[in-house]
Image (cartoon, rainbow, N blue to C red):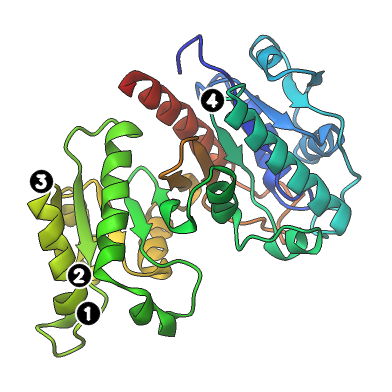
Amino acid sequence: MTLSMAPLAVSIGDPAGIGPEIIVESWVRRFEEGLAPFFVVGGANVLAAAAASRGLALAVEPIADPAQARDVFGRALPVLGQEDVTATVGRPDEPGAALALHSLAEATRCVLLGSAAGVVTAPVAKAQLSAVGFEHPGQTEFFAEVCGKETEQAVMMLAGPSLRAVPLTVHCALSEVPGRLSQALVERRARIVAAALQTDFGIATPRIAVCGLNPHAGEGGRFGSEEARIIAPAIETLRGEGLDVTGPHPADALFTPRARQTYDAALAMYHDQALVPLKALDFDEGVNVTLGLPIVRTSPDHGTAFDIAGKNLADPGAMIAAIRMASEIAANRAAHG
């Protein structure tokens, strides 16, 4: 991140979960991890309590403007706004959800206004958010709407040191997946992924490997026809456009160490086909990146983990990786023009 770039905005997530403690742990490790300046929206007392639960020395300093964060960051964790709650770790409630929603909305507003270079979202509990008026299936859909995009234009990528994977379908029953697949969907998502690999990750000529839906990628139609009817024609179209796209590949062979050297991102057909290998390889460093948006948004690729909150067990690696990736993407976009 360049010295002139705005700081990152971090939303606090559900205060009863592990979000606050992995945020404060990330700030404590800011120098050794080389993290760019960031500020948290709301929850100063929640953050102080999270630090105390982990035995961390933390100074919290309120700021009135995101521009102050860079000067404060070296000596204290900058917190924007006075919204706060008294949270009980492991026991989510509506006041905590209201703080999480306010923090998410305000952090996003800062990015849209240009006073933050990107937003990093700590984990939220969707059921709790729904109880306080959040009407979206998840944060990805929220970002699509506030950015004026169709939901299908906001693409979830899971990225870690070993793998980048994009699920074509996300939160739906496995039985619904075949009916949701289409040639147009494969093509549209692949184009968004290719463009993001160039602008956000600095890969001049991205390589995308596409999974088959069925075992052995259908094995010539013995185990299903989606590969021949939908996936292969989409790949042919994309290759005709000059994109380096291969497949459909049997998913059980695509994530081996040797295979991963042949592509920059894998396009999977459904949620677990992408997330199982990513979490098996990079659970403590996995980042959820939303592609296709005019703003930068990342998040740790894990949930609120209410069961271990406050027990000094949560690993901050994914939050650190999410902060680092947000700053890198912001810098790449700035360089890309």
Query: Which numbered disc, 4 or 2, marks the residue that appears first in the sequence?
Result: 4
Residue 22 appearing in the image: yes
- Can you identify the residue that label 1 sits on? 226
Callout count: 4
The C terminus sits in image quarter: top left
Q: Element under label 1?
A: helix
Q: Residue furthest bottom?
A: 222
- Height in image: 299 above or below 128? above
Rendered image: mark on residue 117: 4
- Can you identify the residue that label 3 sits on? 242
Q: Residue at x 79, y 35 (%)?
A: 47
- Can you identify the residue that label 2 sits on? 231
Query: Which numbered disc, 3 or 2, marks the residue that appears first in the sequence?
Result: 2
Query: Which numbered disc, 3 or 1, marks the residue that appears first in the sequence?
Result: 1
Question: Cβ–Cβ below 8 Å for labels 3 and 2?
Answer: no
Q: Element under label 3?
A: loop
How far apart marks 4 and 2 lie (CA) works out to 36 Å
Foreground label between 3 and 4: 3
Question: Cβ–Cβ below 8 Å for labels 1 and 2?
Answer: yes
Q: Nearer the viewer, residue 133 or 93?
A: 133
How far apart marks 3 and 2 lie (CA) works out to 17 Å
How far apart marks 3 and 4 lie (CA) works out to 32 Å
Q: Mark 4: few, some, or many residues within 10 Å (few <14, many ≥20)?
A: many
Three-letter residue code for mark 3: Gly
Query: Which numbered disc, 4 or 1, marks the residue that appears first in the sequence?
Result: 4
Query: Which numbered disc, 1 or 2, marks the residue that appears first in the sequence?
Result: 1
How far apart marks 4 and 1 lie (CA) works out to 41 Å
The quadrant in which residue 2 appears is top left
Compared across the picture, whether 279 is left or right of 260 comes to right
